[in-house]
Amino acid sequence: MMLFVLLAGCAEKRTIRTIDPQKVNFEVTYDNNFDGIIYPSLIMGLSNYNDKTESDFFTYKLISPKDNSVLRIVMDSSVMNYVTIFQANMSEKGKEYTFYPLVKWKYDNLIKLKQPGKVDFTFTCYINDEEVDVKNMRLSYRSINECLLGLRDSANKYIDYRWMFAAFVNEDHPWLDVMLNNILDQHLVNRFAGYQLGEKEVLNQVFAIWYFIQNKGIKYSSISNTSKYSKQVNSQYIRFFDEVYRNQQANCIDACAFMASILKKIGIMPVIFVEPTHAYLGFYKDKNKKKLVLLETTMAGNVDIATIEDKVDTATGLLPIDVLNKYKKYLTEKDIEKYLAGNTTLEQLKRTISRTNFNNAINYNIKRYNENKKYFSQTNNHSYQKLDISELRQLVLPIQSRSGRYQLRMMTTQDNFQQRVGN
């Protein structure tokens, strides 16, 4: 009986509240600029950035009930985060304190969020080890593919986020080493050496990539809309590197990010130029960034050379005239005559078609770039952005897609182009 009384007394003592929650006034807020929406791509891209003005999502506010109060706030686990404990000392009684917690995000989970949804967060406030208050919050989240473009803040000021395009450039993707080996198997270049072999070889390396992409059969696709609408926030759906490669589809920004990933991997510095309704790629021919080359990546899909072998006449072993006529804008009459005379192989013909298409793509945006060049240098002009990927790496990391060893193995065994080259 005595033991029961003692235990009951202890239990009763633990439940006595000594701190008034109303006086503490514990509050948790999510940045209202985001319209109650969490963007996993933004969290992933900023995962190495420590400037709190850019990376704060949640804010804690409360009033210290005593001098030298010890604060502990526990953010429960959810589909997006691990248990996150924030601790601080509040030295002055009656003073309001504001804190910005560093959330322990579940990065492996964030990259799996392919559909929008809802998430519930719970925050428990302890002061001097006494539970004072609990706050619950429900927010929406978007697909990992959804890139934040910009938003209107509470003062109606537009904040541009299109630098987040750099997060979809992934020079670390595990498929790249296999792809680069496949490109070398085309024998258009002997090695990838960045700027070491001069400007002409830089162009040859980029063309070798271009030719590979065309053999892969990647086509233009305009899909960019998102399923959820926000009056305050603008965003765009962007395919990841492996999604472009596997699905053989890309819009202008998908194609820019895809190509920029490969260029950065081999040491050639890419730039993405963003205009109000379009994006196109640039790259430097020299390591000093003095000579810029433009490239309209969507034009790679203008020419179908991936299936050209299927159109060969089995009787003659040559492409029929009606098929050759479809490629006339990329071939001279002499090119066609040499091919029909047996002096040029089909592979050589394909390379000629691709090279002409490549040269057209380089020249395509020169006029519009020169007309808009002044806008790209205006820091307050959000409609025109020059995104130097190498410079932006100091701010935003690549979003690491969930392509693991299984998918890498799938690529090496199922890539039809690789099998053709191997034969």
Image (cartoon, rainbow, N blue to C red):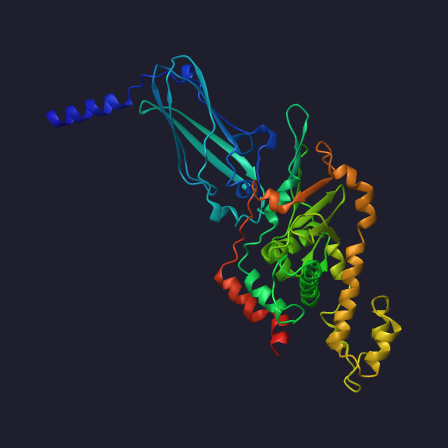
Tell me which residue sits at (55%, 45%) in the image.
Answer: 397
Single out the residue that lies furthest toward the right.
333
Residue furthest to the left: 2
Q: Residue, x 86% and y 78% (percent of image)?
A: 337
Left or right: 104 as drawn, with respect to 193: left
Placement of the C terminus among the 4 image quadrants: bottom right
Residue 358 screen position, x and y as percent:
76, 61
The x and y percentages for residue 212 are 67, 66
Residue 90 falls in image quadrant = top left
Q: Is residue 99 above or below residue 344?
A: above
Q: Taking 16 as reference, is 44 above or below it?
A: below
**Above or below — where is 365 with respect to 337?**
above
How far from the left and from the top, in percent, is residue 12? 24, 22
Whether residue 204 is visible, yes or no, is: yes
> What is the x, y in percent for residue 215?
69, 68
Task: State which quarter of the image contains the N terminus.
Answer: top left
Relative depth, front residue between 14 and 319: 319
The picture quadrant where one finds residue 317 is bottom right
> As drawn, is 391 to the left or to the right of 355?
left
Residue 302 visible in the displayed image: no
Camera-side residue of 154 and 192: 192
Drawn side of residue 320 relative to residue 213, left or right: right
Q: Is residue 126 above or below residue 176?
A: above
